[in-house]
Image (cartoon, rainbow, N blue to C red):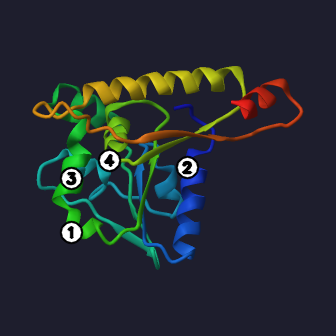
């Protein structure tokens, strides 16, 4: 998932729009850069998304305004990501947290997740709990390469993160691409639109 292509802006704008239409929206900032969190002037080092990886630690859902809440990120998520590499079920931590907190989360009509531009364990956790993965893509050589790489990684994640009894994948998200920075007078933009 390439950086600098509009993931945070898309999450922010879509969350604000949905909440303005009366939907109850939860945004989750899973990027250690904390851009979405800091857009709302939230600067926290406790009770953040990082606590999902710790047993019995509080994760605060902050109400931003009517119909819009956020689980803030932590700058420690990159360090935590490294620590998770030897942990069992490391891709299912968010799934388990969602299951444990279902009664609090069921009030939300939409959950929008902003991720770091990588395919880290933290990002994989977010994919596992998602119905859709939207990836902004630019019509460029790097954009096309990034698209192919993400498709391959999603396929591999679906094969790897399974219920061992049923052999069913925990990954059910559909991958969708959103065109960004399209210039209608370039060859790469025309090729992109045709795909």
Which of the two discs, 4 and 1, labels the residue nearer the N terminus? 1
- Of the numbered discs 1 and 2, the one sitting upstream in the chain is 2
x and y percent of residue 58 in the render?
A: 20, 60
Q: Secondary structure at mark 2?
A: helix
In terms of sequence position, does the residue under pointer 4 or pointer 2 come before the other? Answer: 2
Where is mark 2, residue-wise? Answer: 8
Q: Position of residue 59 (x, y in %)?
A: 25, 59
In front: mark 4 or mark 3? 4
Residue highlighted by disc 3 = 97
- Indicate left or right for 138 with 73 as reference: right
- Determine the residue positioned at 24% across, 55% down: 98
Measured in 3D between alpha carbons, the distance from the residue under mark 1 to the one under mark 2, in whole angstroms, is 27 Å
The quarter of the image holding the C terminus is top right
Q: CA distance from mark 3 to mark 1?
A: 11 Å
Q: Residues within 10 Å of mark 4 (few under 14, many from 20)?
A: many
Vertical order, 106 against 164 (above or below): below
For label 4, the SS is loop
Give the residue at x 57% y 60%: 14
Where residue 103 is drawn, which disc sits there? Answer: 1
* Disc 4 from disc 1: Cα separation: 16 Å
Callout 1–callout 2 Cβ contact below 8 Å: no
**Which of the labelled discs sits on residue 129, or is there none?**
4
- Residue 143 placement, left or right of 28: right
Which secondary structure, mark 1? helix
């Amino acid at each position: 998932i390439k950086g600098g292509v509009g993931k945070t802006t898309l999450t922010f704008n879509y969350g604000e729009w949905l909440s303005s239409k009366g939907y109850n929206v939860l945004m989750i900032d899973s990027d250690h850069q904390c851009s979405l969190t800091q857009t709302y002037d939230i600067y926290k080092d406790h009770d953040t998304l990082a606590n999902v990886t710790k047993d019995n630690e509080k994760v605060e859902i902050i109400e931003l305004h009517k119909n819009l809440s956020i689980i803030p990120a932590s700058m420690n998520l990159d360090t935590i990501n490294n620590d998770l590499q030897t942990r069992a079920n490391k891709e299912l931590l968010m799934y388990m947290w969602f299951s444990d907190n279902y009664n609090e989360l069921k009030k939300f009509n939409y959950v929008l997740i902003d991720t770091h531009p990588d395919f880290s364990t933290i990002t994989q956790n977010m994919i596992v709990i998602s119905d859709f993965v939207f990836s902004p893509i630019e019509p460029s050589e790097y954009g096309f390469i990034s698209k192919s790489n993400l498709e391959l990684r999603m396929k591999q994640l679906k094969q790897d993160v399974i219920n061992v009894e049923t052999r069913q994948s925990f990954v059910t998200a559909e991958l969708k691409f959103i065109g960004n920075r399209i210039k209608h007078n370039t060859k790469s933009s025309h090729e992109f639109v045709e795909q």
